Amino acid sequence: MTMSSSSIFHVLISLLLFVLMHEPTHAIKQSYIVYLGSHSFGPNPSLLELESATNSHYDLLGSYLGSAEKAKESIIYSYNRNINGFAAILDEDEAAEIAKNPGVISIFLNKRYELHTTRSWDFLGLERGGEFPKTSLWKKTLGKDIIIGNLDSGVWPESKSFSDEGYGPIPKKWRGICQVTEGNKDNFHCNRKLIGARYFYKGYQSSPIREPNDTYTFDSARDTAGHGTHTLSTAGGNFVAGTSVFGYGNGTASGGSPKARVAAYKVCYGSCYEADILAGFEHAISDGVDVISVSLGGAPQEYSKNSLSIGSFHAVANNIVVVASGGNSGPIASSVSNLEPWVFTVGASTIDRSFTSNVILGNKQVLKGESLSELHLPAKKSYPLISGADAKADNVSAVDAVLCKEGSLDPHKVKGKIVVCLRGESSRVEKGMQASKAGAIGMVLVNDAASGGEVIADPHVLPATHINFTEGVNIFSYINSTKSPVAYITNVKTQLGVRAPSMAAFSSRGPNTIEPTILKPDITAPGVNVIAAYSLAASPSENEADKRRVPYLTMSGTSMSCPHVAGLVGLVKSAHPNWSPAAIKSAIMTTATTTDNNGQHLRDSLKQATPFAYGSGHVRPNHATNPGLVYDLNITDHLNFLCGHGYNSAQLKPFYGKPYTCPKSFNLLDFNYPTITIPDIKIGQSLTATRTVTNVGLPSEYRVLIEAPSELLVSVEPKRLIFKEKGEKKEFKVTLTLKQQSKHKTEYVFGKLTWTNGRHRVGSPIVVKYPQ
Ligand SMILES: *[C@@H]1O[C@H](CO)[C@@H](O)[C@H](O)[C@H]1NC(C)=O
Ligand SMILES: *[C@@H]1O[C@H](CO)[C@@H](O)[C@H](O)[C@H]1NC(C)=O
Ligand SMILES: *[C@@H]1O[C@H](CO)[C@@H](O)[C@H](O)[C@H]1NC(C)=O
Ligand SMILES: *[C@@H]1O[C@H](CO)[C@@H](O)[C@H](O)[C@H]1NC(C)=O
Ligand SMILES: *[C@@H]1O[C@H](CO)[C@@H](O)[C@H](O)[C@H]1NC(C)=O
Ligand SMILES: *[C@@H]1O[C@H](CO)[C@@H](O)[C@H](O)[C@H]1NC(C)=O
């Protein structure tokens, strides 16, 4: 999701609650997903198998609705490939009856999800001045013939990022299609780079809450929003030289796996619905993708009642890595979504590039800001400065006016001035549009306390810049203390090498609200001011009144960091085709860093960041193919995890497709995750977590290093692991004892466990919750 759509999302959520609370619910027909588990045929079913699976759905639903014909009318999707289930329009009573059927694992409403570059690969050490340094992973692999599927808002197929110049035949393993409607009115096409596309909109159309006047192209995978083009090109777009945004940030745009083949699964039309997402997963799996990137999410939901959990479980069972965004609801604790241990969940952080545009006050004070405004102030002189609150129209409150909401500024007070607008409620670019409409000559966007230090370079429609909270306090006190305040906004300058990464304030934070023994997010990657391809059908501000069009654009969000990791997964997978999804994820996590380019711990606004913001740390692509050791997991381990989480054997069969008997007991602390989290321990108590590491390097001897605060005693047994060959596995036990309550009155204590043989450092964060 991009930041600006989140407020719309919240409005719609309250609308949904309103509908649910104020209507007699029994009469409402809504779309539901009925989940039945797995099919027993392989990933490439025959037509006969597909047909018989769909008929079994008609039969099952028909037995409730009276006839198979009625079932046929009611079903909008029959998931007949990997995932077994269907989506259908039902009323609440029918849904309640179906839920009682022992063959039904879960039934849930078709809920709404929100859609959650150039420099970033440089920053990650893959390139330097257009060349690949010796240590660059791009010297070894460019992700050739890896297939990346993206569940998003479609794709702009004409973008240079998806040109197939120089590409050979489509890999044989590909079984997908390029779906176009009859007559192909919008001339959608695929090629040897963009090898497939499909669209799924029935879940969206069956929903009672659509966006007002939606103008989405339904029967085409063409991206009219920009989001899907941006994310897909970040994961697997070509090298495209000379890209910039309004001339800023000039450089070579590229995906993480620049030579990968890509496929677009359009499941989002402004927002995304679960029935469509599940259909996207099902087809991506049977089409033969290697990696699925999903930059979207909703409120956290139990695993069996959540299409992203179900779809991704089936994908991982088919050896496909699923990477998902953690959400843009930070910095509030427990805001992270996409909490499945089989999903790779990504937070967002900054890179070392800034689009600097400062405010110079009449008293010569310089306030640091960032912007991607195309327009500059007409002359280098100072202009009158006014707070939105002081420029309020008669019929609005100062609180609304300082936010520069629609119609809140009085044109007589604003004309020819630079207006100061507070961040929040409406989108950042929208505020500038309102200021411009009222006749302002410029805008300074100011953070509130919650958004703190994070500033974002936006493509404003007027000369404008964005300053942080501290600088905001400075500008307001200057205005307060000056009779005729004036200011100037300097032209945008691209600066490289600024201190980074630091966590983006919007990046969603742990702890995990569904299963607290699993740390989420897993990792952080670049997600602020990322330049990538865009749709020529959308404006850079995502606002209809903005008529500008750009082929490349900066966007910010965990939506942008997720495809960075998906691209990196493509590289690791191409270097190690036989590694499991969990091994690939472990390699990327254990080689991550918690240090910035200043040699200091990652920052989160003015504080030190914690694993609840960055998981294992910030990705280091050049280390990820050679991690030394991996924490591996297979499907049995994931089923055991679900047992430990509280599912019984009967509930599990359908996840797996065949019977599975839960072990007598399964301690979640022993789940072989590459991080260790203890959500429940008493003072003086000791708890033990068991882990197994697999040697993926040369024969070697590893020793353990522990970093822990004095409140926490961590002991590891054995302290040395000797590997005589590649592929060898060794078990170890970590015993944690909480000696005393926190000295600092914090809720959690953090540490780190690292295995090292001198060459490799295999790091895992440790998170322990104090008893409350
Ligand atoms: C939707 O379209 C109708 C008719 O074109 C128009 O009157 C109305 O203002 C539009 N609503 C929104 C929210 O754009
Ligand atoms: C971007 O850089 C290329 C060379 O790397 C140059 O040819 C081009 O003119 C530059 N474009 C802009 C808009 O600065
Ligand atoms: C205030 O009044 C102006 C002029 O009548 C109108 O355009 C504007 O929409 C009003 N603002 C609000 C928030 O009602
Ligand atoms: C805001 O920016 C100034 C100047 O770069 C810096 O000194 C200050 O610490 C920043 N404030 C926050 C809250 O990050
Ligand atoms: C500026 O003045 C307004 C109203 O008089 C007050 O609410 C605000 O706190 C002042 N801000 C600063 C930074 O002094
Ligand atoms: C998963 O790995 C465990 C050992 O860790 C093994 O006992 C089990 O058979 C494996 N399951 C599958 C499906 O390969």
Image: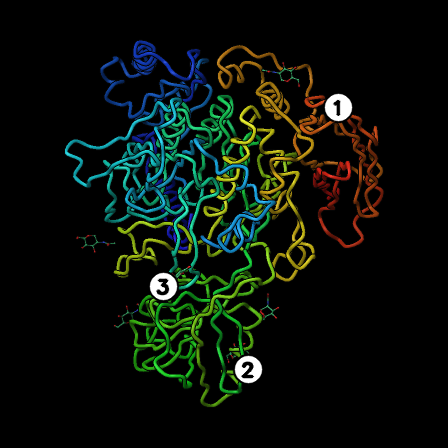
Number of residues whose C-alpha sits closer than 10 Å to that of mark 1, classed few (under 14), some (14–19) or many (20 or more): some
Dividing the image into four equal quarters, which quarter contains ligand 1? bottom left
Q: Which residue is mark 2?
A: 365
Quadrant hosting residue 735 = top right
For marks 3 and 1, the one nearer the N-term is 3
Q: CA distance from mark 2 to mark 3?
A: 28 Å
On the image, the x and y values in percent for residue 337 come to 52, 40
- Judging by the rendered image, the residue that carries numbered circle 3 is 246
Residue position for label 1: 730
Q: Within the image, what quadrant is residue 587 found in? A: top right
Assess whether mark 3 and mark 2 are in contact (beta carbons under 8 angstroms): no
Label 3 and label 1: CA atoms lie apart by 54 Å
Q: Which mark is residue 583?
A: none
Q: Residues within 10 Å of mark 3 (few under 14, many from 20)?
A: some
Q: Amino acid at mark 3?
A: Phe
Q: Nearer the viewer, mark 2 or mark 3?
A: 3
- Assign a secondary structure to mark 2: loop
